Image (cartoon, helix red, strand yellow):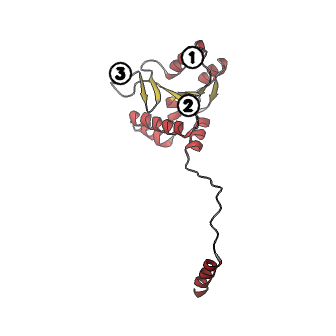
Amino acid sequence: MILVIDGFNLIYKFTDLEEYIHNRELEKAITGLIEYLSYFANQLKKKPVIYVFFDGKKQKGDDTYQENVKGIHCFYGHDISADSLIMEFLKAKKANNVSGIKVISSDKKIQQFAKSHRYDYQSSEEFYIWLKETTSKKTLTNEKPDKITKKEVDYWLKVFKER
């Protein structure tokens, strides 16, 4: 599976990352999203290839257009919108008959583009829920508790009777 993600669209679903944006700590927000996505990918049985597209620059004065961080392919639009980058990326993949792509964005224009090119898509809100469910620390067990012996039951009954 290949995930194509509208970066800032998804960042705003995480309250901690959104706060970085409001505090003008763009690099922390981007780094946080990459951390979440990397952890998420490592929880899946079949690790997806993840491409994240961001509007603007990574940070002020930075000329990075593309980088790979923790296995996540990151693209920065500089003067081009992330939406435009995503659509160009999807067109190139279509031309090369690449399948198994899921587009993550709540932007209606991106969703419509994905749909018209027959790519699977999911809103950022739905993806956020999937990510949270996948990365939660819930552990389910089918183990039965150890049996308590009669001697232990008698001991605890005695303790509670004395109180």
Q: Quadrant of the C terminus?
A: bottom right
Q: Is residue 128 above or below residue 51?
A: below
Q: Nearer the viewer, residue 21 or 93?
A: 93
Q: Kindly check if marks 2 and 3 are in contact, taking CB atoms under 8 A apart as contact.
A: no
Residue at point 46%, 38% (across, down): 35
Q: Amino acid at mark 1?
A: Lys
Q: Closer to the N terminus: mark 3 or mark 1?
A: 3
Name which residue lies at 53% across and 31% down: 9
Q: Is residue 13 visible?
A: no
* x and y, in percent, of residue 149 in the image: 64, 75
**Separation (CA) of disc 1 from disc 2:** 16 Å
Residue displayed at 57% across by 14% down: 91
Which residue is tagged 3?
A: 63
Instruction: Tell me: 58 left or right of 130.
Output: left
Residue ID for mark 1: 93
Q: Which residue corresponds to the image point at 55% horizontal and 40% vertical from the top-left? A: 43
The percent coordinates of residue 100 (x first, y second) are: 62, 24
As drawn, 48 above or below 116? below
Q: Which residue is mark 2?
A: 48
Which sits in the foreground, 63 or 131?
131
Q: Residues within 10 Å of mark 3 (few under 14, many from 20)?
A: few
Point out the tag, 1 or 2, that comes first from the N-terminus.
2
- Cα separation between marks 3 and 1: 25 Å
